Structure formats: structure tokens, C-alpha cells
Amino acid sequence: MTPEKLVHAQTVEALFVRAFENRLTPACREALKKAGLDLDRKLERFYTLEQWKAFLRIAAAHVYGGVPAEAAYYSLGERFMDAWFGTFLGKALLGMARLAGPRRTLLRASTGFRAGTNFIELRIVERGPTSLELWMNDVVADQPTFAAGMIARAAELAGGWRVVAIPEGFDGTSSTFHVRWSEAPAVTAINGSATADGRSAAPRPRA
């Protein structure tokens, strides 16, 4: 029997508690509550994948209302990754990522993704020193751009410059991502920051 796909509480916490803090509207919080996420109570240990997808739909609709779904989900993915690296486990992984650089960070991405769910699997093929193909068995969202946002932001935080993550062959569950980046200028690597020119080209609506 195939195990039920579950999303760990720390994954939900990263996006809906840390990333959004207290910025969600009462209407959004009420919609999340009806979907199974009561932000006024202690989080459950696990949520089903379908619940998680519903939470993302609500966030996309309320936080990015009127924005094309692809762009809204991409931004949600970025926000999630920023918040994830602010968790206890994420901080440890971020330190290692900055030392490893974008290439080795992406090659080891399975560790981070598996920490947040019980089902994500990755297959990675290097296409060059600054490019690779990453296949994900489940993009954990209605739009593959959510995972693209996560992947691109992880590479940026690891020191990648002008990162692009393009999803292809999305079948409703799995997708292949074509990822490429440039090596960050020395000043960026030292300061651990990036300017707008260094971020990937995909749209990022902000609430």
C-alpha cells in the first residue's frame, strides 16, 4: 500500500507563520481555517498533500489576487524558501549551502526537500558547470512554478547569480526543471547579498 503523502508541520510553519507572519487578512485566515489550517492554534504534526495544496490556493488568491497563477506560485515558492532557511534546520543547511555554492547545493537538494515531506524524490543530471536538469516526482502544488521559485531561490541563497529555473513536462504531479546560473561576483559572495540584477528573471509579485 502506498503511504499517504504528508507535509510536515515545519513546512507549513515556514510559509504560513514565518513568511507571512501576521500579514494575512482575516478573510484569508478564515479560509485557511476552513481548509484545515487554524493559525490561532498549535499546528498539527502533519498535513496531507491535498490540504497543503488547498492552503497554497488560498494564499495565491488572497495574497496575490489578480496576479497570474504562474507568477503568484513562483513568488510563494521564493517566500517559502526564504522562510525555510530561517528555521532551526534551515539555518544549518543555509550555512552549508553558502560554503558549497549553487552547484553542490542543488546536487544535494534531496536532503532539504525530504525534510519537509515524506514523499519527494529528485533526479538530477548535470548539463554543465552552471546548469542542470532536476526532475521532481511531485511539485507539491497546482503550478510547477512553486517548485521553480523554491529551486531558484535556493540557488541564489547559495551564491548563484542570475538564476533561471524553467519547468517543463508538467503532468499535474511531476516536472523537470532546467536550471542555470552564473557565478556570483566576488563582492556578492563576500557580502552574502544580491541586487535585483542578480535575481532570476521570473516575475515576483510581493504582497
Image (cartoon, helix red, strand yellow):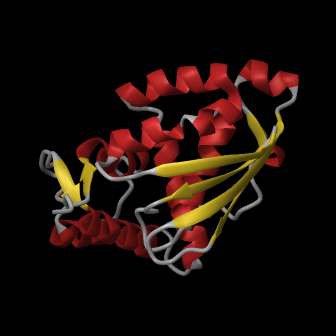
163, above or below 193, in the image: below
Along the viewing direction, whichever of 177 and 36 lies nearer the viewer: 177
Q: Split into 4 quadrants, where in the image is the N terminus?
A: bottom left
Q: How many labels does the image show?
A: 0
Q: Where is residue 16 in the image (x, y as percent from the top left)?
A: 34, 52
Q: Is residue 162 visible?
A: no
- Residue at 55% x, 69% y is 72
141, above or below 162, in the image: below
- Residue at 77% x, 59% y is 201
- Residue at 36% x, 25% y is 88
Q: Position of residue 53 (x, y in %)?
A: 34, 68
Q: Where is residue 206 in the image (x, y as percent from the top left)?
A: 58, 60
Q: Residue furthest front?
A: 1
Q: Which residue lies furthest to the right in this view?
A: 185
Q: Is residue 101 visible?
A: yes
Is 72 left, or right, of 43 in this rendering?
right
195, above or below 29, in the image: above
Along the viewing direction, whichever of 98 and 188 lies nearer the viewer: 98
Along the viewing direction, whichever of 123 and 201 lies nearer the viewer: 123
Q: In which quarter of the image is residue 185?
A: top right
Q: In which quarter of the image is residue 113?
A: top left
Q: Position of residue 194 (x, y in %)?
A: 75, 36
- Residue at 49% x, 26% y is 93
